[in-house]
């Protein structure tokens, strides 16, 4: 490639983004903009990571509003085969198009270029650089070695329920929380959110978009990236995991139900799906690291729209769908505001379970149980006993049960449990 070719690509990409901002409703994401701007004090690099089509490109541009920047997206068939030595032409193209005083550079989906790390490392010495990528291991290679800590990574998730409402010009107030009609409207919107999920394009193109996103993740972010030969078997495994959201898995069990006979291959495949942000792997909490490592993992999917498109059926177990939604929201809150927290699930030898354990430092901050109950009589005994046992073992008094439509504070066996509807928790 030469500079003129790259200039044409950069220009057309900029025109497409300008048209998008003019044509579409663009909302400000609930992200820590101030911290992200501060992270760009060179020679740092800001890496905005996350699942494909979660809005990373728009997010990076919103972070640099009113700034002078150059932008190029490498997830483009015209530039997909660019060579590492030709990356210098990108900077030259920015200079010739925008002037030599360009201060910020956005390298979108840069993982598509081999050996991009050296270019980014050199670039950040004179520019403020944002890189985006759809793989959580983007910064685990040579770049991390060269940067020696001089970078910040931030994970962007699909739209939250609150962002979904804002997209439709709905901004609930505290007064709305006491209006029967408004609450009914919000819960109806929540059902739509369950169905379509949080990918921005799902609200433009409908239910076909989550499936297309899923297929692109499998094909582009995993099969092509890792050069997997047994494509059919891998695709079956991916579908099985998405269909078994909110369930425990073990690598041995996955080996037994697939034609893959090597546990290490199974583990690698699961890690590929996790690295591409399609699935979330939650560890079982234990004070002993060894026990935590050998215990079964819990699997969640990044988006309920994908579950609705790919899984065999989810309508029979609405509670599991709620649990999946809560898992993603907890990780979203961790990324956007409380990065020093850790998320686990808890289970003892009596099979008593708590859906989520929130740990901060050495302390267990909160225990959360999720149930689809709409009234007290629908809450199963095991939900209570799991919370009580975990509360004693983990010495945590902050107990929360997220329900579909039941709200109260109760003291049970000397322990106070807060019950809150899912819609209200999502908006809190």
Image: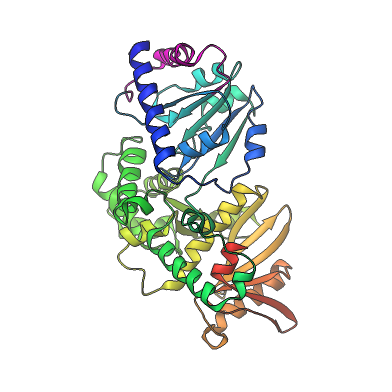
Q: How is the image coloured?
A: rainbow
Q: Which corner quadrant holds the N terminus?
A: top left
Horizontal side, residue 116 vs residue 309: left or right: right
Residue 3 spot, x, y in % from top left: 38, 11
> What span is in magenta?
79-104
Viewer-closest of 162 and 296: 162
**In the picture shown, does residue 150 fall above or below 292?**
above
Viewer-closest of 68 and 276: 68
**x 26%, y 39%: residue:** 229
Viewer-closest of 219 and 167: 167
Count how many numbered circles sit on residues in the image.
0
Magenta run includes residue 93: yes
Horizontal side, residue 28 vs residue 73: left or right: right
Q: Which corner quadrant holds the C terminus?
A: bottom right
The quarter of the picture where residue 52 lies is top left
Magenta run includes residue 379: no
Viewer-closest of 55 and 284: 55
Task: Name the residue at the front extreme.
Answer: 22
Decide if residue 347 is in sight here. Answer: no
Residue 205 spot, x, y in % from top left: 31, 51
The quarter of the picture where residue 13 lies is top left
**In the picture shown, does residue 9 fall above or below 171?**
above
Horizontal side, residue 121 vs residue 168: left or right: right
Decide if residue 11 is in sight here. Answer: yes
Residue 395 spot, x, y in % from top left: 74, 68
**x 42%, y 38%: residue:** 22
**x 71%, y 69%: residue:** 398
Task: Name the residue at the bottom extreme.
Answer: 377
Residue 170 spot, x, y in % from top left: 51, 60
Task: Name the residue at the left extreme.
Answer: 232
Horizontal side, residue 117 vs residue 239: left or right: right
**x 49%, y 37%: residue:** 137
């Amino acid at each position: 490639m030469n500079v003129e070719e790259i200039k044409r690509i950069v220009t057309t990409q900029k025109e497409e983004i300008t048209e998008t901002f003019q044509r579409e409703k663009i909302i400000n994401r609930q992200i820590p903009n101030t911290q992200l701007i501060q992270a760009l004090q060179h020679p740092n690099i800001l890496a905005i990571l996350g699942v494909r089509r979660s809005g990373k490109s728009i997010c990076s541009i919103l972070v640099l509003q009113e700034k002078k920047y150059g932008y190029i997206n490498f997830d483009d068939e015209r530039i997909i085969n660019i060579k590492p030595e030709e990356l210098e032409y990108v900077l030259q193209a920015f200079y010739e198009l925008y002037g030599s005083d360009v201060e910020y550079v956005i390298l979108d989906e840069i993982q598509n270029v081999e050996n991009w790390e050296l270019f980014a490392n050199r670039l950040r010495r004179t520019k403020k650089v944002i890189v985006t990528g759809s793989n959580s291991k983007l910064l685990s290679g040579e770049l991390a070695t060269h940067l020696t800590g001089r970078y910040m990574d931030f994970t962007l998730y699909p739209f939250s329920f609150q962002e979904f409402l804002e997209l439709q010009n709905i901004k609930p107030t505290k007064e709305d929380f006491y209006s029967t009609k408004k609450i009914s409207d919000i819960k109806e919107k929540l059902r739509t959110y369950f169905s379509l999920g949080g990918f921005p394009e799902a609200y433009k193109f409908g239910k076909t978009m989550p499936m297309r996103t899923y297929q692109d993740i499998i094909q582009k972010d995993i099969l092509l990236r890792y050069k997997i030969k047994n494509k059919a078997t891998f695709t079956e495994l991916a579908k099985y995991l998405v269909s078994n959201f909110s369930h425990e898995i073990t690598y041995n069990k996955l080996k037994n139900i697939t034609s893959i006979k090597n546990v290490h291959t199974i583990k690698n495949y699961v890690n590929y799906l996790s690295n591409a942000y399609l699935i979330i792997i939650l560890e079982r909490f234990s004070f002993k690291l060894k026990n935590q490592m050998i215990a079964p993992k819990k699997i969640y999917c990044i988006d309920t729209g994908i579950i609705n498109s790919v899984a065999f059926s989810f309508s029979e177990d609405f509670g599991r769908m709620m649990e999946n939604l809560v898992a993603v929201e907890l990780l979203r809150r961790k990324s956007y505001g409380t990065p020093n927290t850790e998320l686990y699930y808890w289970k003892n030898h009596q099979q008593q379970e708590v859906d989520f354990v929130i740990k901060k430092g050495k302390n267990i901050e909160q225990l959360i149980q999720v149930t689809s109950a709409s009234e007290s009589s629908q809450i199963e005994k095991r939900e209570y006993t799991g919370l009580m046992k975990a509360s004693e073992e983990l010495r945590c008094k902050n107990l929360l049960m997220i329900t579909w439509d039941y709200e109260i504070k109760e003291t049970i066996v000397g322990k106070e449990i807060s019950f809150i509807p899912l819609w209200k928790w999502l908006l809190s």
